[in-house]
Amino acid sequence: MATPAEALLKVPTPTLVVAGDRDSRSATAAALAGSLPKGRLILVPGDHVTALGAPEFTAAVLDFLGDPVSLGAQRAQVLQEGQDGSTGVAAPAAGT
C-alpha cells in the first residue's frame, strides 16, 4: 500500500530519494521526491539494482548526510580540545 500524499506532505525531515537513470521506476521516485517538502531526487548511473553499486550512489548519500566520516572526525577534534565544554574524556559505561 502506498503512503498517502497528504502524509508525505507532513514529513518535515530532509529526505534523499536516489534512483538509477535507467530505472523503470525513476518516474515514481521523482513523484516521491516532489511530494516531500524537503525531498531531493538524485539520479545515478544504472537501473533499479545496479545503481546501488555506482560510486555516484555512495557520493550522493555521503553528500546528503554531510559525510559522516568527516563529521565524526570533527566531533572527535572538538572533544579532544574541550571546545564543547566537556573534559574530552568519555565516562565509562554503567556497570564497567
Image (cartoon, rainbow, N blue to C red):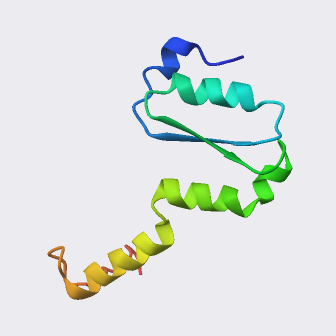
The image shows residue 21, relative to residue 65, as above or below, that is above
Marker count (numbered):
0
In the rendered view, does 44 fall on the left or right side of 81? right
Look at 55% across and 61% down and name the residue there.
62
Q: Quadrant of the N terminus?
A: top right
Q: Is residue 46 above or below residue 28?
A: below
The front one of 35 and 74 is 35
Give the residue drawn at x 35%, y 80%: 76
* Residue visible at 50% across and 12% down in the picture: 6
Quadrant including the C terminus: bottom left
Snapshot quadrant of residue 17: top right
Q: Position of residue 33 (x, y in %)?
A: 57, 30
Relative to 64, residue 48 above or below: above
Q: Nearer the viewer, residue 26 or 91?
A: 26
Question: What x and y, as percent, mark residue 66?
Answer: 45, 61
Q: Can the viewer see residue 6? A: yes
Q: Quadrant of residue 18?
A: top right
Residue at the image position 78 percent from the left and 30 percent from the top: 25
Residue 3 coordinates in the image, percent (x, y): 62, 19
Image vertical order of residue 56 relative to residue 31, above or below = below
32 vs 51, left or right, is: left
Along the line of sight, the residue nearer the viewer: 38 or 73: 38
Task: Locate residue 45, reporting x and y percent.
Answer: 77, 51
Res. 89 visible in picture: no
